[in-house]
Image (tube, rainbow, N blue to C red):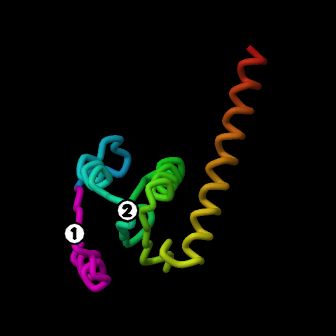
Amino acid sequence: MDTQFAALSKFGVDEIVHEKISGVAKQRPELDKLLDKLESKDTIVVIRLDRLGRSSRQLIELVLDFEARNINLVILDMNIDTRTPTGTFFLTIMAGIAEMERTISKRETAEWNRDR
């Protein structure tokens, strides 16, 4: 944890949220508090993407929420910063993946219901 705190501090993070909960936990109260107080043009910084969410679906939903609320995301180990054109491109790719997953899920559900 010390290494992560040092990297976040070096980046200039004002507030570090630390949550000691199992990775599979559905409820993450500290993350929820942070998300509730974020405002447009705020930036959330994570060491690795898996520090923010534990499943692809959860991560994509968070990224889409950030985009809708004009909140920036920096992922240090991937060198992704949505304040840049490359970071915006990353968000576009994530949104496309989310849409594809929704489409596939709807199709599979419809097929499952039809076959019953």
Looking at the picture, how far across and down is residue 78, in whole percent?
50, 76
Earlier residue among tags 1 and 2: 1
3D distance between C-alphas at marks 1 and 2? 15 Å
Q: Which corner quadrant holds the N terminus?
A: bottom left
Would residue 39 be counted in the magenta stretch? no
Provide the residue designation for mark 1: 15
Which residue of the protein is positioned furthest toward the top in this rendering?
A: 116
Amino acid tagged 1: Glu
Query: What are the residue bounds of the magenta stretch?
Result: 1-19
Looking at the picture, how far across and down is residue 65, in whole percent?
47, 52
Looking at the picture, how far across and down is residue 113, in whole percent?
72, 19
User: Considering the numbered disc 2 on the image, is that residue within a helix, a strand or a loop?
Assistant: helix
Drawn side of residue 25 relative to residue 50, left or right: left
Residue at image coords 42%, 62%: 71
Name the mark nearer the viewer: 1 or 2: 1
Amino acid tagged 2: Arg
Provide the residue designation for mark 2: 51
Drawn side of residue 57 relative to residue 40, left or right: right
Q: Which corner quadrant holds the C terminus?
A: top right
Q: Which mark is residue 106?
A: none
Q: Residues within 10 Å of mark 1 (few under 14, many from 20)?
A: few
Residue at image coords 71%, 40%: 104
Tell me whether the residue at label 1 lies in contact with that at label 2, contact meaning CB atoms closer than 8 angstroms.
no
Q: Nearer the viewer, residue 38 or 81?
A: 38
User: Considering the numbered disc 1 on the image, is that residue within a helix, a strand or a loop?
Assistant: loop
- Res 51 → quadrant: bottom left
- Res 91 → quadrant: bottom right
